[in-house]
Image (cartoon, coloured by chain):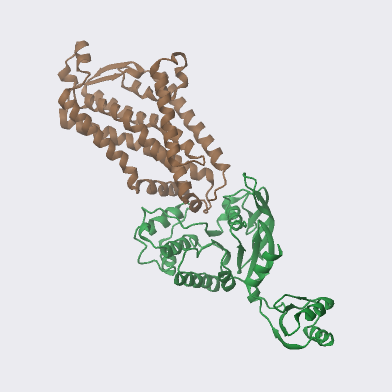
């Protein structure tokens, strides 16, 4: 079931630049969906529209069946978000910040706040002013505020930006813990391919405001059939592949068409006079997919 | 309603937890002490007016009279500045710092958020003026002690009055509440400008400039026939509450205009804010 639906979003900024061009996708319950793209691809704009801070020219976002554009309050009650940089009122303590932010949701449950603060490992520092917080602590406080009060879906806008490797790892483990133990649905916006690859089930790739890919993260996919061919004559091999209706890149990575079995392709190669040195199952990386899409466009 | 007050509590907590908020209070206190020292050394300029009216200057130069003079000077010099500072910051600074994005990720409408901020501004205006009035009175007591008369001179609304101590006390504190309401107009101008995509300082300077130009136009006499169009004219109506006989129709008219201006500025500010995309 889709918990978050992005439907035909288009947005042009007053400067005339196209930010989004008919983007649609959905986030299913319990999954982590990665939103990938270069700077300015439209990732944060989608987040902004989802939170009702950016008005789309066309289209809408629905959260749990409620439209953000017509029923913002109802839709946003189901969401927790880290949107853009984690900024807080530096003259307030972490606790006071949470209190002021939660007041806008009309909610305050001290026991639940303490539980979440403990989960994000901020118990010791929560009474300190946030001006004394490190970047990592701010991100954890941002996550705490997003988790209060118990959202169904989390929107994370480049949450590990600026964190050191330990911080990134800690944050990633927290997010995976949330999904595993609480069944949290997460939309993760990032330009870090490794992060998306390690955390997400599926991803959407944007380029210049357009969706260019939606599907499983390559390392997670179970249905695709990709093989690595090793041969001394790549040119001949490519010719045979083309005749057989398969595609092969310059590194010998072959994608088997749906209407064929892998052994049929091998037979075609051998019959075509190609010396097959090796034919190994190949796991495509997200980077390969991303770079492939970039070079195509 | 409970939700509204919970949310408002959050806004007030943010405002009054900020050290910067208290700069206004500190500056007012420092200015008041300075004016009191000057009054102590050189005497009150109204002494001659009291004597010319055939009244006893020693009786009417009381804690209330001196406090009233000090309040007038302080509000004129600093009131507009600090109210504009706070009101000019309240939306523009939060937008600039990214706090608004944090707040609007919550299920709260932009209208509700702005209303909370606007009411917080108004609250600050009234609170700041009450602080000024009470501290001036305490300093006046330190200078002249309890008792005496209360001489009032508010040239903006042509009010000259002589009260005894108990009536004077009533009028002094009663009019102070209305002075606070008057000052919300300056807060509203700064708040309105703050709703645009501009720097907080620009909102503050814009509001101060407007009030200053309005004040100059009123006092210069160029707009004698159009004084009803000037906001400072209506803001000065609080002085009528110090007259021996209060002209209620004029007071009501003045505050109706201020109320209407406040509502209009809030509505326009909201319209501007509602149409904005909040993204860095």
> With respect to residue A21, does A297 lie above or below?
below
Which chain is painted in brown?
B
Which residue occupies the foreground of this view, A133 or A297? A297
Q: Left or right: where does residue B158 sit relative to residue B98?
A: left
| Residue A49 visible | yes
**Image quarter hosting the C terminus of chain A:** bottom right
Q: Left or right: where does residue B5 sit relative to residue B79?
A: right
User: At which x and y percent is residue B169?
Assistant: 25, 27
User: At which x and y percent is residue A121?
Assistant: 41, 69
Which residue occupies the foreground of this view, A194 or A65? A194
> With respect to residue B170, does A213 lie above or below?
below
Which residue occupies the foreground of this view, A85 or B130? A85
Q: Left or right: where does residue B216 sit relative to residue B268?
A: left
Who's the residue at 47% across and 71% down the image?
A165
| Residue B251 visible | no
Q: Quadrant of residue A164?
A: bottom left
User: At which x and y percent is residue A180?
Assistant: 55, 74
Which chain is painted in green?
A
């Amino acid at each position: 079931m889709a918990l978050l639906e992005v439907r035909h979003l288009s947005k042009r900024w007053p400067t005339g630049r196209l930010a989004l061009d008919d983007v649609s996708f959905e986030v299913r319950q319990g999954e982590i969906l990665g939103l990938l793209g270069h700077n300015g691809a439209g990732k944060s704009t989608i987040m902004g529209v989802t939170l009702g801070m950016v008005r789309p020219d066309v289209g809408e976002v629905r959260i749990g069946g409620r439209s953000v554009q017509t029923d913002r309050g109802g839709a946003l009650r189901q969401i927790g978000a880290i949107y853009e940089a984690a900024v807080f009122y530096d003259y307030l303590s972490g606790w006071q910040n949470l209190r002021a932010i939660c007041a806008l949701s009309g909610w305050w449950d001290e026991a639940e706040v303490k539980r979440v603060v403990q989960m994000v490992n901020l118990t010791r520092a929560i009474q300190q002013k946030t001006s004394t917080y490190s970047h990592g602590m701010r991100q954890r406080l941002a996550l705490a505020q997003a988790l209060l009060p118990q959202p169904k879906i989390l929107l994370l806008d480049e949450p590990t930006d600026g964190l050191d490797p330990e911080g990134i790892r800690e944050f990633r483990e927290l997010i995976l813990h949330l999904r595993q133990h609480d069944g949290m649905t997460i939309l993760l916006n990032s330009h870090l391919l490794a992060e998306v690859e390690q955390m997400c089930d599926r991803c959407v790739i944007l380029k210049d405001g357009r969706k260019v890919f939606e599907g499983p993260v390559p390392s997670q996919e179970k249905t695709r059939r990709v093989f690595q061919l090793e041969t001394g004559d790549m040119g001949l091999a490519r010719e045979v592949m083309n005749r057989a209706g398969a595609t092969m890149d310059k590194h010998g990575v072959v994608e088997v068409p749906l209407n064929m079995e892998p052994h049929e392709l091998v037979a075609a190669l051998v019959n075509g006079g190609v010396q097959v040195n090796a034919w190994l199952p190949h796991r495509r990386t997200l980077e390969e997919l991303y770079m492939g899409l970039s070079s195509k466009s | 309603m409970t939700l509204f007050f919970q949310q408002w509590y959050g806004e007030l907590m943010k405002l009054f937890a900020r050290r910067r908020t208290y700069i206004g209070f500190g500056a007012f206190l420092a200015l008041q002490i300075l004016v009191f020292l000057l009054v102590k050394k050189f005497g009150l300029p109204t002494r001659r007016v009291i004597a010319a009216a055939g009244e006893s200057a020693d009786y009417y130069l009381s804690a209330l009279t001196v406090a009233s003079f000090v309040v007038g000077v302080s509000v004129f010099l600093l009131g507009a500045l600090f109210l504009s500072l706070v009101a000019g910051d309240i939306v523009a600074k939060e937008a600039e710092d990214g706090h608004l994005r944090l707040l609007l990720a919550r299920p709260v409408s932009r209208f509700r958020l702005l209303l909370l901020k606007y009411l917080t501004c108004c609250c600050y205006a009234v609170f700041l003026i009450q602080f000024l009035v009470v501290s001036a009175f305490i300093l006046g007591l330190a200078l002249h002690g309890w008792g005496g008369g209360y001489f009032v001179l508010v040239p903006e609304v042509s009010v000259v009055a002589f009260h005894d101590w108990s009536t004077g006390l009533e009028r002094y504190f009663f009019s102070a509440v209305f002075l606070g309401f008057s000052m919300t107009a300056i807060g509203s101008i700064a708040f309105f400008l703050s709703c645009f995509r501009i720097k907080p300082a620009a909102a503050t300077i814009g509001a101060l400039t407007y009030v200053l130009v309005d004040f100059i136009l009123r006092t210069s006499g160029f707009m004698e026939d159009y004084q009803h169009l000037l906001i400072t004219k209506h803001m000065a109506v609080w002085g009528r509450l110090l007259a021996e006989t209060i002209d209620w129709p004029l007071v009501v008219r003045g505050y109706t205009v201020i109320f209407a201006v406040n509502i209009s500025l809030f509505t326009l500010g909201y319209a501007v804010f509602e149409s904005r995309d909040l993204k860095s």
